[in-house]
Each structure stands twice: as C-alpha cells, then as structure tokens.
Image: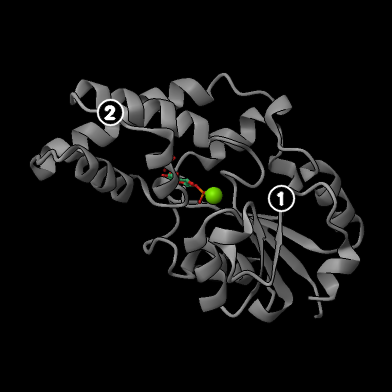
C-alpha cells in the first residue's frame, strides 16, 4: 500500500489504561453491591463511557433512571481521572516510541483516534502529545466505534485518503471501524479477538515500516 498515515487507538495500544478503567468500574460495582471481574472488563474495551455503564449495569442486574446513569458515569470518571493523573511516561507501552519516531522520520503522519474523552489528559501525562500530528478523541465525535467516524476524521485532518492510512487497535469494535472506513488495520493483542485485522501483533515492539507498507 501507499502508506502515508498511521492512526493509533490510545487505550490498549499506546498505554495500558484499561487497568485504571477496571479499577474505577469495579469500585462503582462494589458501591452498587455486585462483583465486576477482570473478565467482565474485556467487554468494555474501546466502548464509550455511557455504553460501558450500560454493560456494567446489565452485569449487576441494576436498573436506574437516566439521571442516575449520568451521575454514576460522572462518579466513575472522577475516580478514573484521579488514577490517570498519577500516570508517567514510564507507562508508555513497549515499542510505541520507537515506531512513532521511525514513522515521523519517514514523513508518515501520525494521529490518535480514541473513544476516550480523557485522551488529552493522558497524552499530557505521558508527554506524548507532540508525537502526533492530529488528535481525535471522544469529545470530537458523535458516533462510537465500530462507526468509522473517529478514524475518518483523523485521516481528513491529516489530509490523507483513508486508503493510505493504517489503524492500530486493540478492540474488535475498532478493527470493524477501520474496515468500515476503508482503512488497513493492525490488531494489537490476541488473534482470536482481532481476526478481522490485516495483521495481528502482540505489541508494537517488532513491527517494521516495511511490513506495514506490504499490507
Ligand atoms: P472515557 P480507546 C476507550 O479508549 C477505552 O478503551 C474504553 O474502555 C473507554 O470506556 C472509552 O475510551 C471511553 O473513555 O471514559 O475516558 O471517555 O481504546 O478508544 O482509546
Ligand atoms: Mg483501545
């Protein structure tokens, strides 16, 4: 392919914030008097905050009013912000920096395409904002993944055609969004869940630009 841009999901690809989301959701479940397991947490990856809350409430068999839902989501987010405010550049996942530097050296543009409304805070905490030409986060989109909006906005702001872009994603919904947007995709994680990606890798450590160009 004629590779001109790479779009990275944030949580689960560049940093492991899934653990902080889990800690905050588990605390909320505890307050609502039910257990929320690490296994349950898998279903929340890449899913928006309100959709995550719906899944959580479903697991606990809890019914609340729309107003209470807003309050519960806000409560979870306050804890989550507390957790991520202590993040440091040490938490950048292995291989990310090397790949981002190599891409930029080659003149390939880089973007973040994240469902998170907290993406800006995370990028600031890990000092990585300047490695991305474009940042599209949960505050700038109306439709959640698997809708391709977040990635299409990223390619548009990079002034690139979707067919020249590769999306890096750890969530199934994100791979579906890349496909729907007409982009190549690299799944970061386990092949079982990310089978529809053009390539699946365990992390960003060994991937080369040549491999990406061959997709
Ligand atoms: P927030 P990504 C996603 O980020 C997370 O994977 C998902 O677990 C989270 O619920 C969602 O962001 C919304 O996050 O509550 O911070 O707005 O993987 O798309 O970078
Ligand atoms: Mg993710």
Instruction: Give me the disc on residue 35.
Output: 2
- Ligand 1 within 8 angstroms of badge 2 C-beta: no
Q: Position of residue 109 (x, y in %)?
A: 77, 62
Indicate left or right for 19 with 188 as reference.
left
Q: Does dot 2 land on a helix, a strand or a loop?
A: loop
Instruction: Give me the disc on residue 36.
Output: none
Q: Nearer the viewer, residue 45 or 189?
A: 189
Residue drawn at (64%, 77%), measured in percent from left and top?
162
Q: Position of residue 161 (x, y in %)?
A: 67, 79
Q: In the picture, residue 17 is in which quadrant?
A: top right
Indicate left or right for 206 with 164 as reference.
right
Residue drawn at (53%, 22%), measured in percent from left and top?
85
Asked if 91 appears above or below 42 in the picture, the reply is above
Within-10-Å neighbours for mark 2: few <14, some 14–19, many 20+: some
Q: Nearer the viewer, residue 159 or 211?
A: 211
Query: Disc 2 to disc 1, how far (Cα)?
Result: 29 Å
Instruction: Give me the disc on residue 202.
Output: 1
Q: Position of residue 184 (x, y in %)?
A: 67, 74
Indicate left or right for 50 with 11 as reference.
left
Residue drawn at (53%, 42%), measured in percent from left and top?
119
Q: In the picture, residue 186 is in which quadrant?
A: bottom right
Q: In the picture, residue 4 is in which quadrant?
A: bottom right
């Amino acid at each position: 392919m004629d590779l001109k841009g790479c779009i990275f999901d944030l949580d689960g690809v560049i940093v492991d914030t899934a653990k902080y989301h889990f800690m905050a959701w588990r605390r909320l479940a505890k307050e609502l008097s039910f257990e929320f397991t690490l296994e349950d947490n898998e279903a929340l990856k890449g899913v928006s905050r309100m959709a995550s809350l719906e899944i959580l409430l479903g697991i606990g068999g809890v019914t609340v009013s729309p107003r209470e839902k807003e309050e519960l989501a806000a409560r979870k987010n306050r804890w989550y912000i507390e957790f991520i405010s202590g993040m440091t550049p040490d938490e950048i996942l292995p291989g990310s920096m090397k790949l981002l530097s190599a891409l930029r050296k080659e003149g390939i543009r880089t973007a973040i395409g994240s469902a998170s409304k907290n993406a800006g805070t995370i990028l600031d905490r890990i000092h990585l904002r300047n490695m991305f030409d474009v940042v599209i986060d949960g505050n700038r989109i109306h439709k959640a993944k698997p809708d391709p909006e977040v990635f299409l906005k990223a390619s548009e702001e990079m002034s690139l055609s979707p067919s020249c872009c590769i999306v890096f994603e750890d969530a199934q919904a994100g791979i579906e969004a890349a496909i729907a947007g007409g982009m190549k995709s690299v799944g970061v994680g386990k092949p079982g869940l990310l089978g529809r990606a053009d390539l699946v890798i365990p992390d960003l450590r060994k991937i080369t630009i040549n491999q990406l160009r061959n997709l």
